[in-house]
Image (cartoon, rainbow, N blue to C red):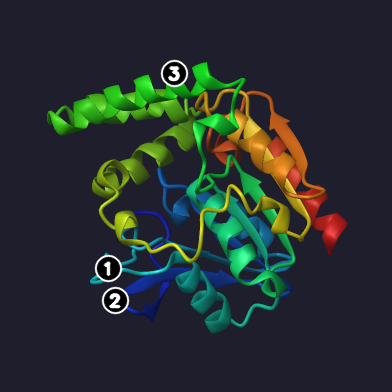
Amino acid sequence: MSGSDKFSHLDVKGGRIAYEAAGQGSGIVLIHAAIADRRMWNREFKRLAGDHRVVRYDFRGYGGSSKTSEPFSAVHDLGELIDHVGLRRPVLVGSSMGGGLAIDFALARPHDVSGLFLIAPGVSGMQLSMFPEDQEAFAEDDRASAAVQAAWREGRKDEAMEGLRRLWVSALKGPSLELFRTMLKDNMEEVFTEATASQAQREGPGTAGRLAEVHVPTVVIYGDRDNPSSGPIARFVAKGIPGALLVQIPGGDHLTNLSQPDAFDAALADFLRRIQ
């Protein structure tokens, strides 16, 4: 695996989690998107470790983590990692799938989180009826996603990867684009088949109907160049969590920390100042 190769492993039920921890101070956990791995946080991991105890890790099946030999709970994995590293009520910074997991964790262990910083978060239990004004956005997403999956199934891997790039990270360029392409190539089987993710067990009902039960400070950000459905979902999450702040990042795509790092840094720094 390219990038940082100095990581530790935590044994969990049915697998092993690759993680890195650095710095001292209040805790922050960086949770990656389904189209990336822990390397999407290369810049933030180093910057935040100057004032915080920072942890980043790979989901099962990604990066340096193993696949799973049995059904598992991503919430349980995250909790074991937090306990193992010795963090006390960390801030969870979650991107996409990682944002959805952060919400799930805050519902499962509400006293073990001090804040949520969510980047275009996913949320389980959604139904299209929840988005009466955004049907075309979801239809556009479905059409583009179907084309990407068809290319993958038919063995046109380069076309599938390029279609995914256009759909999710059209604003990336330069080193950030190269990092994304590297992560995608290294994790393509998991990204396109969700083989490991499909074995994740959910604890309780989907979270779309439970957002009002989240009672920690929350910021939800999304880019105006993201996947068409990401904006409606971000607005839904921010509206559902009491007191949550919604921030749109101009020129940002699904990985706003890579496409608009200055705006991302400013939003995160402001959030950390307000809650710590």
Residue 192 placement, left or right of 89: left
Q: Residue at x 50, y 64 (%)?
A: 204
- Quarter holding residue 215: bottom right
Quadrant position of the N terminus in the picture: bottom left
Q: Hey, which quadrant is residue 213 in on the image?
A: bottom right
Res 68 label = 1
Q: Nearer the viewer, residue 84 or 269?
A: 84
**Residue 265 appears in the picture as rendered:** no
- Which label sits in the foreground, 3 or 2? 3
Q: Quadrant of the C terminus?
A: bottom right
Reading the image, the residue beneath label 3 is 140
Number of on-image labels: 3
Is residue 91 visible to the viewer in this orientation of the structure?
A: yes
Q: Dot 3 surroundings within 10 Å: few (below 14), some, or many (20 or more)?
A: some
The residue that appears at 71% across and 74% down in the rendered structure is 111
Left or right, residue 272 beside residue 194? right
Q: Which residue occupies the foreground of this view, 7 or 188?
A: 188
- The one of 263 and 190 positioned closer to us in this rendering: 190
Query: Where's residue 161, x and y in %?
Result: 29, 31
Q: Amino acid at mark 2?
A: Gly
User: At numbered mark 2, what does the secondary structure look like: helix, strand or loop?
Assistant: loop
User: SS of the residue at dot 3?
Assistant: helix
- Identified at 48% across, 49% down, the residue is 97
Q: What is the x, y in percent for residue 198?
A: 31, 55
Residue highlighted by disc 2: 14
Q: Is residue 77 left or right of residue 157?
A: right
Q: Residue furthest left?
A: 154
Nearest to N terminus: mark 1 or mark 2: 2
* Circle nearer the N terminus (1, 3): 1
State the SS at label 1.
Answer: loop
- The amino acid type of the residue labelled 3 equals Glu
